[in-house]
Amino acid sequence: MLEVQNAKKYFGGVKAVDNVSIQVKKSSITGLIGANGAGKTTLFNMISGFIPLTAGTVIYEGEDITNQPAYKISTKGIVRTFQTPLGFPRMTVMENMLVFAKNRNAGIFTAIKTSKKVTPLEEEYIERARKILKDVGLGNKEDAWVSDLSAGELKILEFARPLMADPHIFLLDEPAAGINPANLNSLVTLIKDLRNKGYTFLIVDHNLKFIMNICDYIYVMADGKLIFEGLPDEVANADCVIESYIGKKKTEDTVSN
Amino acid sequence: MESIVYGIVTASIILLGSVGFSMTLNAENFINIAHGQMLLLCAYITLFLNAYMSIVPAAIIGILVTGVFGVLFYKVFYRPIKKRGAMVLLFTSVGLAYVINGVVGTIFGTTTFAYKIPNVKEIIPGMTPYQLLIIIAAICSTLFLHYFLTKTKIGKAIRAVSENSDLAKTRGIDTKRTSNYVWFIASSLAGLSGVFLGVIGSIHLEMGWNQILIILAATVLGGLGSIYGVMAASVVIGLSMELGVLMIPSYYRLAIAFAIIIIVLLIKPDGLQSLWNKSGKRVA
Amino acid sequence: MLTGTALFLSSILTLAAIYAVIALALNLEAGVDGLWDLGVVSFVAVGAYTYTMLTVSPASAGQSYIMGFGLPMWVGVLAAGIAGSIVAFLIGKPTLKLKNEYFLITTFAFAEVIRQILTNERWLSNGVAGVYNLAQPFKTYFTPSVYPYILLLLLVIIVFIVYVVVHRLTYSTFGRSLKALRENEPLALTAGIRPDRFHIRAFVIAGFFAGTAGAFYVWYSTVITPSLFTSDITFFVWMAIVIGGLANNKGAIVGSVIFVLAGESLRFLDLGSGFAVRMASMKIAILGLILIAILKWRPQGILPEKKVKFSNSSKNS
Ligand SMILES: Nc1ncnc2c1ncn2[C@@H]1O[C@H](COP(=O)(O)OP(=O)(O)O)[C@@H](O)[C@H]1O
Ligand SMILES: [Mg+2]
């Protein structure tokens, strides 16, 4: 359903993404792993229209969406999350949800004429948002400022929000980073649930266990290039992956500690 | 010829004001509207001292005092609220600009003043020694600043902080100390610029506002925060303001500066944007 | 004495009401949407001049300005708003692409250029001399001694109307999208919100109300000169909304009243003649201090942005 062909992104001399092709099948959970700086986020940015491609194409449901503006791509049902989720900090959880409601019906003159605080249409969205929040375990938080949420709650909210608009495919950038084990489990259940309902996922993460556990198919990147792809066990046993990814990760950990 | 001399003199004055503005913009990441009032402050301090002594010692004391005020303002007004972001800092600087302007106005009134300086003859046709002095001072300041930023330890630290203050901190650079230097130098240069404005023209309450607008123009043209870019931009704006009045009425002098930045931004919003984006603020 | 004080008070409250209209406009674009507009005075100036040129009689000897159609006031007010919107559109179209810092500088620059044109192009609007003795609404129906209160009443009604409109916009889906852009533009993009569209709408609406405020300002001052429209207006209105509470519409009104009262009440201090000219300076110094103090000790303003709750309004549905 989503296909990236020979994508390249150069920042000056840095080849952040170098000739990467990936394919995400409908209702699959596809993983993308690689050390810090491998180019994963850059790839996400290109798919979702945040930065232009130096070369290559992005095809979604048979349509070429290369370099379309981000707001347009998201209305097609492709939603992405961000590595550092902030949400809309000075808005409530409910407002955060409503921003993502599909028919945002932003008529200015209607708004000026309407004396009701909540229109019937909005009423519907509010009910829908409540249901989603309840399902993901944020039911009691609807009136909280998003800036007051914990890091874990923010991560959950990060993809509760797009559910308002019935997306087809989620691009999740490091959803498990900084999440505690208990929350991680509910995250895994949540993702698997959604997949069973027909949603598709492309997930970038560092947590190998999480990725291995959840994904149907995995791509491995290093220094902007695709170095391996395969089923979870194949990836777990591939020499080049262990060498380039896990080896590198170790050294990085020691640096950042 | 005369216009070119004027242009270079104007450019020198703009340069002295803009360089300091850019330094604080780089170091603290906010637009310091009060910077224009530092020119005014120094011009008036010098004016006050000029009643008791000749212009040169008056200006020197004035500039040093203004530098100290700069550091003081930073410590009292900006540093305590630095964490609250660019918007709060910006409007604090607007508040401070009004305070400085208001206090100076309360003391000196709305009269237009001039310094007591000896009358001199043109040394070469079309150029007075004062104009020559201004140009030389601007060149010397530029060279000094370049030497200071690239060769001295504290200068290098300032550049490191400007590029990435978090990284600089982890590398053990004392950002408080570099800030003091930045504000002292920036404010003194502004002060020097203010005194020069008074020497070639007059001293009045609007000078700070007029000048901050031109400084903003130079800063945009030079690419927000690039010190060398701003130097070049100051020359371009100074020259075009003075040469422009040959073609259009002189009361549009200031408008020329704005027209330039408006045009530049309209033609090349992304070019300049990308310069600014090196700070990585917008990267998703 | 008492009537003197009451008159004075009604006069400054009228001024505060005009500020409040501009503040509400600015609050929509700068508080709800996050545009750092340092050129809001452009709309006020263009609105004021459009109103004047359309409603005055043709230029007499010794004056020179365009138009002078003698149209009814309400046409003038509407035209002032539309002119404000048009200027907002023309300025906004190219500049809204720019990020905060550039946008701020360009709008500031535009405002100065507009003022310089009004100052220097005498054929357009009589230059620095301006136009005097401009008419005020409903003036002939009242005796001169009560008229100031009528004008105040009229402006209070206008502020109320503008408040209702801006309030509804703020809490509509449109306003929510603006807030989303202000809070996190990349995330708003993933919700399908198109930044340029929303920003320009907010900017044009703000231009409309600020433009009408220009007409009201002419009612108040009965004269029009370019020196009324310096960037001080922009900064003062910003101060008013920062003091009142950014993104809070009641705050915009409260801030305007406090700001104008604080500035004008200094006139009560009797510091002897000769000090009068310095009073203006002292006033801005004190206003500057108030702004600094608010930002330091109450950065959210007197009335912080309201939390939008839906839990009570729709629980029993
Ligand atoms: N906006 C940018 N400008 C310049 N270089 C960038 C930019 N974004 C990313 N890079 C570089 O591209 C490379 C890949 O980064 P990224 O995609 O963030 O990696 P990952 O998400 O895999 O950790 C890194 O070397 C990074 O420094
Ligand atoms: Mg990343």
Image (spheres, grey):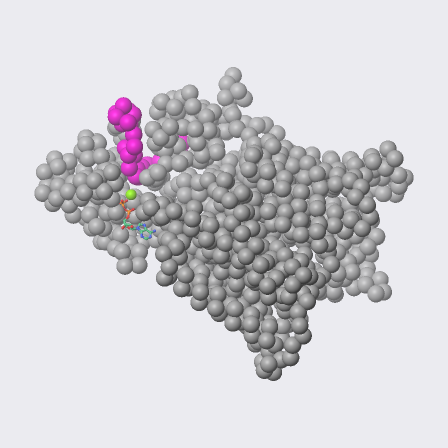
Instruction: Tell me if I can see residue C147 in this picture.
Output: yes
Residue B201 lies, with reference to residue A176, above or below; the image says below
Query: Quick one: quadrant of the C terminus of chain A?
Result: top left
Residue in view at x 65 percent, y 37 percent: C255
Residue C69 spot, x, y in % from top left: 79, 56
- Residue B3: name its quadrant: bottom right
Residue A118 lies, with reference to residue C61, above or below; the image says above
Furthest residue toward right: C143
Residue C87 spot, x, y in % from top left: 62, 54
Query: Quick one: quadrant of the N terminus of chain A?
Result: top left
- Please state the extent of the stretch shown in magenta in the rendering: A164-187
Residue in view at x 71 percent, y 50 percent: B106
Q: In this view, does B78 lie to the left or right of A15?
A: right
Residue A18 spot, x, y in % from top left: 23, 53
Residue in view at x 12 percent, y 37 percent: A236
Furthest residue toward bottom: B125
Q: Which of C70 and C12 is in front in this view?
A: C12
Q: Which of C16 and C262 is in front in this view?
A: C262
- Residue A171: name its quadrant: top left
Q: Nearer the viewer, residue B232 or B142?
A: B142
Residue in view at x 61 percent, y 83 percent: B125
Instruction: Tell me if I can see residue A125 in this picture.
Output: no
Magenta includes A169?
yes
Magenta includes A31?
no
